[in-house]
Amino acid sequence: MYHLRSSPPLEPLLAVVERMERSGLVVALGGSGLLAAFGLADTVGDWDLTTDAPLDRVTAGLDGETFTHKGSDELHADQKLMLAGGSIEVIVGFAFHAPAGVVHIPTRVSGRWNGIPIGGPEAWAVAYHLLGRREKSEALWRDLAHRGADREAVALLLREPLPPELANRLLGLPTSSDT
């Protein structure tokens, strides 16, 4: 296991993931947790989970959990549920407002880390770029250039109204079968 210098406790995250998966929901760890899972960060501020499930199914799957709801804003075209005192954020319908329209970031599980499903680095390289978090985005782009991208993940992202520089960057990645 990659050593984390700092992070919220894993136990509440594991409990939320278990409850959601038991309800038939697909969830995936993203954000700094994903970076840590890939060995690209040693500090996690909070745990971000994404899901493409509808909000009502997510809230039903969290039955018994206390959460705070936050809707979309000028940048985010998704909904967020904050749990465990803000240390866990469930992002429902992960999406951003972009110049050409709403860019949906699909939830795809690329593996597991410490028992937690982790999202795709391709999705989070794009998401961090759209968030203006260049350092984190670049760390993922470098990692993808080295290990290769998942061809299906790239195809899904290219269906979105991405800014041209992001689409070109995705198109320029080697795929995992090429590396």
Image (spheres, grey):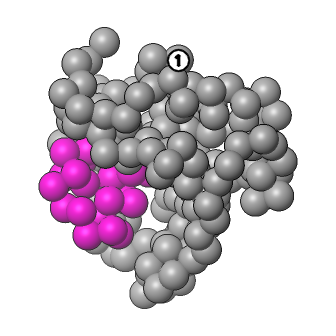
Viewer-proximal residue among 3 and 12 = 12
Q: Is residue 148 above or below residue 49?
A: above
Q: Residue 74, percent across and down?
A: 47, 85
Residue 177 lies in the magenta-colored region: no
- The image shows residue 19 at horizontal and vertical percentages of 73, 30
For label 1, count other residues whose C-alpha is less than 10 Å away and answer few (under 14), some (14-19) or many (20+).
few
* 142 left or right, relative to 175: left
Q: Residue at x 26, y 70 (%)?
A: 132
Q: What is the quadrant of the C terminus in the image?
A: top left
Callout 1 secondary element: loop
Q: List x then y, in percent, for residue 111.
A: 50, 24
137 displayed left or right of 177:
left
Question: Of 120 and 150, which appears nearest the observer?
Answer: 120
Tell me the residue that label 1 is attached to: 115
Magenta stretch?
122-141
Residue at horizontal 82 percent and vertical 34 percent from the top: 23
